[in-house]
Image (spheres, rainbow, N blue to C red):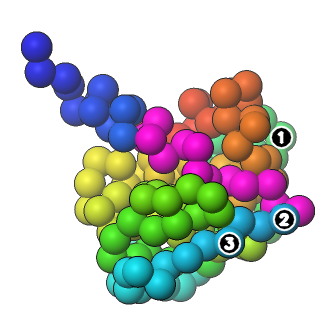
Amino acid sequence: MKPTPAITALLLLMLLLPACGQDQSQPAQVDISMTSIVWQGYANEDPVLLRKFNETMECLNSFGFFHEGYPYVVVVEDIFTCGAYKDKLGCYSANTVFFAQSAYESTLYFEVFKHEVIHWATGLGIENETTAPYFTQCEVH
């Protein structure tokens, strides 16, 4: 039986989860030296990112989370290191959302970006990903 695209995306997203949203009192060291930057700028500078950012923030607002401004976004060509985790598709560290171009160009694009925006907006680390409802309810639209 072949997995559906939704199941495939969910499995790939689960591979991402252990690496993102580190405790922001000690931001994760992000190492992108083994890849190159494809695009960088604030989330409001790209119309697609802005739309997905606004969707995520609208959902988070319903939970009482409000955050002014926009995160800085760095899209890199390939997977990278986030803290102690290697081969990652996404990471949030020091007011910056990082994610790999492969995630940007796939069905994971929106889920990876939204997931990292949730970390940015809430300030919550990976320890909250399994208990906080916004990580499941605000990622997929």
Q: Amino acid at mark 2?
A: Gln
Q: Which residue is mark 3?
A: 29
Q: Nearer the viewer, residue 54 or 76?
A: 76
For disc 1, the neighbor class at 10 Å (few under 14, some 14 to 19, many from 20) is: few
Q: Quick check: 56 left or right of 37?
A: right
Q: In the drawing, does residue 61 fall left or right of residue 3?
A: right
Magenta span: 13-25
User: Which label's residue is closer to the chain start, 1 or 3?
Assistant: 3
| Mark 3 secondary-structure assignment | loop
Q: Are marks 1 and 3 in contact (CB under 8 Å)?
A: no
How far apart are the alpha carbons under marks 1 and 2? Answer: 25 Å
Label 1, secondary structure: give it. Answer: loop
Mark 1 — residue? 64
Residue type at numbered disc 1? Gly
Q: Is residue 26 above or below residue 42?
A: above
Residue 12, by quadrant, is top left
Query: What is the x, y in percent for residue 14?
Result: 46, 36
Give the x, y percent position of residue 111.
45, 47
Q: Are marks 3 and 2 in contact (CB under 8 Å)?
A: no
Q: Quadrant of the C terminus?
A: top left
Residue at the image point whose x is 33% and y is 76% from the top: 77
Q: Position of residue 24 (x, y in %)?
A: 82, 61
Q: Which mark is residue 26?
A: 2
In front: label 1 or label 2: 2
